Image (cartoon, rainbow, N blue to C red):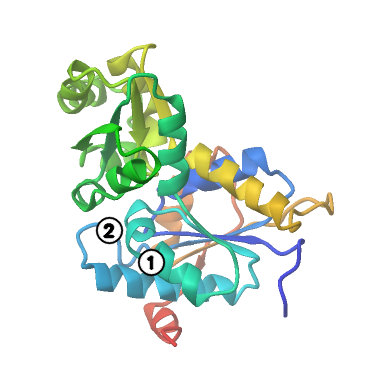
Amino acid sequence: MMSTAASPIGVFDSGIGGLTVVAEIMRQLPNEEIVYFGDTARLPYGPKSNETVAQFAMQDTRFLLSHDVKMVVVACNTASSVAADRLKQSFDVPVIGVISPGALAAVSASLTGHVGVIGTEGTITSHAYKRALHRIDPEIEVIEKSCPLFVPLAEEGWTDREVTLVIAHEYLTPLRDAGVDVVVLGCTHYPILKQTVGRVFGPSVTLIDSAEETARDVAHVLTELHIANTTGRVPHHRFFVSDVPHRFQEQAERFLGRSLPEVELVTIDELTAMSG
């Protein structure tokens, strides 16, 4: 079956963080259907080798394509930095990562040329955002900071706890003191903590939500390629994971603020069979 404008958008991540991208696609493009895959059995991708992440990303993409998606969104910073180019070369559908949209928005928003990037240790040590920012503007000064505790805090839903604010101050005060005027939330979990991060930096610092910018990029590409869904029917979303679907369902419903259809399980054997 060939994909059409009415076909779904495929989104994958190593776990639940990519749901912030899903939430933004749902908000900005309410007609679009989504097939989401969270590779919960093999998360996190960050500490793994580039070759392993690339292999997983290829399998994840092939799984989504088996559901006739018209586009693949790599809603994972690690997979975007390591595998997005390979996926674009390997498949005939548009592939969108989360790094380039956020970098472009950061350069556009910065008045001083001092940009902060926060992310997981894997994303920060890869310097993927720094490279993307410097491709756009070589003069941009980039200050990077890994914030590893933000992911478990987001997954626990501890968005307004005092401990979260204390940890945020510990991580972010050096960036604030360095005079950045823009900060990229370089992990798809981090938009959940956007309010807390904003309290540390104050109103003079612009926060770039990579999920929001990626959804904008999705909308732009769909329009440019004339494959936006204009049927007007209520979209039917599907969610798949590679382990513990009931736990994912609980977290996903909290992330998205809506009830979901039953989350479906994909075995690792099924995924590895898609290595091709």
Q: Residue at x 59, y 41 (%)?
A: 216
Q: Position of residue 32 (x, y in %)?
A: 70, 52
Q: Can the viewer see residue 157 in this picture?
A: no
Is residue 163 shown left or right of residue 218? left
Q: Position of residue 217 (x, y in %)?
A: 57, 46
Amino acid type, callout 1? Asp
How many numbered discs, if any? 2
Residues under numbered marks 1 and 2 in contact, where contact means CB atoms less than 8 Å apart = no
> Callout 1 environment at 10 Å: few (<14), some (14 to 19), or many (20+)?
some
Amino acid type, callout 2? Pro
Q: Which of the 4 quarters of the picture holds residue 112? A: top left
Q: Nearer the viewer, mark 1 or mark 2?
A: 2
List the residue tagged with mark 2: 44
Q: Residue at x 39, y 63 (%)?
A: 244
Which SS class for mark 1? Answer: loop
Q: CA distance from mark 1 to mark 2?
A: 13 Å
Q: Nearer the viewer, residue 7 or 216?
A: 216
Q: Residue at x 42, y 74 (%)?
A: 58
Task: State the mark number for residue 243.
Answer: 1
Q: Classify the position of the N terminus by image quarter.
A: bottom right
Is residue 57 shown left or right of residue 117? right
Q: Earlier in the sequence, mark 1 or mark 2?
A: 2
Q: Position of residue 123 (x, y in %)?
A: 26, 49
User: Furthest-top residue in view?
Assistant: 203
Q: Which of the 4 quarters of the picture holds residue 191? A: top left
Q: Which of the 4 quarters of the picture holds residue 236? A: bottom right
Task: State the mark number for residue 206.
Answer: none
